[in-house]
Image (tube, grey):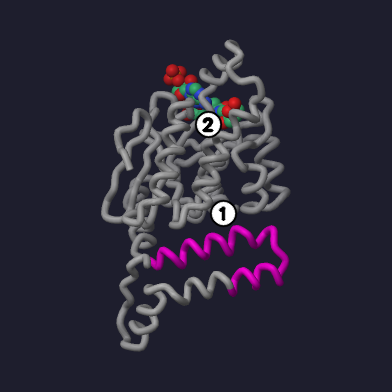
Amino acid sequence: MRTDFQHLLIVQDGSVLTITMNRPEVLNAFNDNMLAELTEAVEAVAQDDAVRCVVLTGAGRAFGSGQDLHSLAEGRSIGAVSKVSEHIQKYHRVVYAIREMPKPVIAAVRGVAAGISCNIALACDLRIASDDARFIEAFARIGLVPDGGGGYFLPRLVGVGKALELSMLADEVSGPEAERIGLVNTCVPLEEFEEATQALAHRLAKGPTRAYALIKKLIYTSAESDLQTSMRLEGDLQDMAFETEDHQNAVVAFLQKRQPEYKGR
Ligand code: T3D
């Protein structure tokens, strides 16, 4: 994949690829170009077997401040978008690409994650936050509803009551509080954030990547499935997992009393 983006930094370290949204002067707010670039990068990395874990993060003191409100106002004033739902579909494409990515995607959130930036973090498989993180479902502050899948992800992560509270009051949730309510998986002190993020990413990148892709499918469909449907899918996915080299080698490794080395195949 190309790495010469205007508003993204791409760094590959072994089989971990880190995508950094890079508009720090506006706390990494999304303009059209950054959104298009993020879509391209996420779709490209999905195809790259050399990458086995993706980290999404923000440059500077924030993860992201949501839609760039200067671009939004400008687009409206020149009548560039007739219906905002058409614009939102561009965000949906990124959300789908993250969810369908056949490898783990980690959102690494330091500082603020507001509006659509917050919801893109929620679309990722795992979230690590620093203790200075601030999650804000900022939409109601400007008279909007949570978009980018927020209305789907939020109640599933924190429950309906909390999702309504966060969406309606649009108050900040700190990193430690986000961990307590299940909005993020873990919250670490800021000074340990980079190291903890990379440690998690490298751990996942050394794991059974194909099984992880199948696990994503199983877990992400569970909320819409009844038990029978979920267990039927489980059987189909297990058939696939059963055929992987990683599974077969891991069983041999267990029997030989040694650690398995997963190849992602
Ligand atoms: O068509 C569509 O796409 C509709 C869909 C919308 C999806 C959404 O995301 S809606 C939500 C949009 N985002 C917001 O409403 C958040 C706006 N920003 C803020 O409320 C605050 O900036 C924060 C709480 C995020 C952070 O506050 P703070 O005090 O840490 O930083 P700050 O000083 O407010 O911001 C620093 C700079 O970033 C500042 O620029 P300046 O004054 O230094 O030149 C500020 O204007 C800029 N900035 C922050 N957020 C945005 C932004 N510029 C453009 N768009 C932003 N969203």
Q: Quadrant of the C terminus?
A: bottom left
Which of the 4 image quadrants contains residue 196? bottom left
Up-down: is 147 above or below 80?
below
| 125 within the magenta span | no
Mark 1 belongs to which amino acid? Arg
Magenta residues, as a range?
Answer: 207-235
Helix, strand or loop at mark 1: helix
Q: Which mark is residue 66?
A: 2
Q: Which x, y percent locates residue 140?
A: 67, 30
Instruction: Specify whether tag 2 is near ligand 1 (CB below 8 Å).
Output: yes
| 223 within the magenta span | yes
User: Would residue 134 appear left or right of 4 to someone viewing this image?
Assistant: right
Question: Residue at the location (43% across, 41% down)?
Answer: 110
- Residue with the mark numbered 1: 180
Label 2 to label 1, Cα distance in Å?
23 Å
Residue 189 shows in the view: no
| Disc 2 to disc 1: CB gap under 8 Å | no
Helix, strand or loop at mark 2: loop
Question: Residue at the location (37% across, 57% down)?
Answer: 52
Q: Quadrant of the N terminus?
A: top left
User: Would residue 99 appear left or right of 263 to someone viewing this image?
Assistant: right
Q: Which mark is residue 21?
A: none
What secondary structure is the stretch in magenta mostly built from? helix
Question: Residue at the location (63% across, 36% down)?
Answer: 147
Question: Residue at the location (50% across, 55% down)?
Answer: 185
Mark 2 belongs to which amino acid? Gly
